[in-house]
Amino acid sequence: MNREGCKACHTKDNLSLTGKLPGSHVHHLSDVNCVKCHGKTKKPEALTMEQCVACHGSTAKLAEKTKDVKPSNPHTSPHYGTELDCNLCHHQHAKSENYCAQCHKFNFKTP
C-alpha cells in the first residue's frame, strides 16, 4: 500500500505508525478493504461474528489455535464456551481490549 491509500483514513499530518498495527491496518495491508467486510453501504455497521468467522475460521478453530495462551485461553471460557462475540475484544477501528480483564486479572495482549 502507498501513502495515497493511507489518506483514505488519515490526514497528511497523521500518517505515521509505531509499534504493532491495529486490526484495521493488518486487514488493509492484506488487501482486505472496507467493502470486503462491511459490504457496499453508505454507513458501515459493526461486523457480526458470522462475518469474522467467514475469514478467520470457526470459534472452535480459534480456540484450538490459542489453547496454549496463559493464564487462560481467550477463545474459550467457562462462562461463554467458544461463542463469545468477537467484537467484545477485537475492534476494527479502535484499540482492542481484553474483555475478560473487566472481572479477571488476565494479562494477555489482545490483537
Image: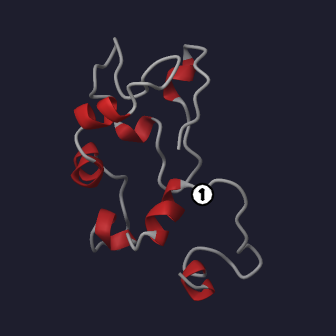
Query: Where's residue 60, x and y in %?
Result: 24, 31
Q: Is residue 2 above or below residue 27?
A: below
| In this picture, residue 82 sits left or right of residue 96 | left
Quadrant in which residue 36 is drawn: bottom left
Q: Is residue 33 above or below residue 2?
A: above
Query: Where's residue 35, x and y in %?
Result: 32, 72
**Callout 1 secondary element:** loop
> Which residue does the image show at 43% across and 35% down from the upper left?
88
Label 1 belongs to which residue?
Answer: 21
**Pick the front one: 69 or 100:** 69
Quadrant in which residue 106 is drawn: top right
Residue farthest to the front, as pictured: 68
Quadrant in which residue 30 is drawn: bottom left
Tally the numbered discs: 1
**Pick the front one: 51 or 17:** 17
Query: Where's residue 4, x and y in %?
Result: 58, 88
Report the colour scheme: secondary structure
| In this picture, residue 85 sits left or right of residue 106 | left
Residue farthest to the bottom, as pictured: 4
Residue farthest to the right, as pictured: 13
Residue type at mark 1 is Leu
> Which residue does the image show at 46% across and 43% down from the upper left?
90
Q: Is residue 27 above or below residue 13?
A: above
Label 1 crowd (10 A; few <14 / some 14-19 / many >=20): few
> Which residue does the image show at 40% across and 74% down from the upper left?
31
> Which residue does the image show at 30% across and 72% down from the upper left?
41
